[in-house]
Image (cartoon, helix red, strand yellow):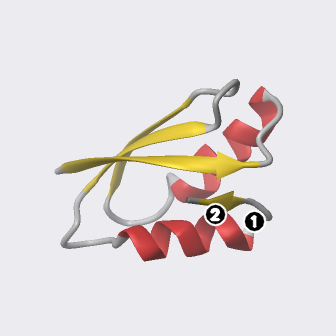
Amino acid sequence: MKSINLKICDINNAENSEDIKRVLGTSEGIENIVIDDETGIAEILYAPELITVDDMKRTIYEIGYRAD
């Protein structure tokens, strides 16, 4: 397992964070997601052999947010 921090733009409340957790959390290889609503920083624990950072960013983009 690896951990990465991604800055997710346009998060402005807990509902936005829950949307991201719900959708990204269903991806194979995602073990855990913690998002700070105030900073927009998502700490993601994942299996790099099952999902890439680009895959995560693409999933986040597809639901209307941007991850850097």
Residue appearing at x 51%, y 40% in the figure: 42
Number of labels in the image equals 2
* CA–CA distance in space, label 2 to label 1: 6 Å
**Residue 13: image tag:** none
Which residue has dot 1 on it? 63
In the structure shown, which secondary structural element does the residue marked by tag 1 occupy?
loop
In the structure shown, which secondary structural element does the residue marked by tag 2 occupy?
helix
Mark 2 belongs to which amino acid? Ile
Q: Looking at the rendering, in which quadrant would you find the C terminus?
A: bottom right
Mark 1 belongs to which amino acid? Ile
- Measured as percent of width and height from the top left, residue 38 is found at 70, 24
Identify whether 23 is placed above or below 41: below
Q: Residues within 10 Å of mark 2 (few under 14, many from 20)?
A: some
Residue appearing at x 58%, y 75% in the figure: 58
Identify whether 3 is placed above or below 48: above
Residue appearing at x 50%, y 58% in the figure: 26
Which residue has dot 2 on it? 60
Query: Relative to residue 68, is residue 38 drawn left or right?
Result: right
Q: Are marks 2 and 1 in contact (CB under 8 Å)?
A: yes
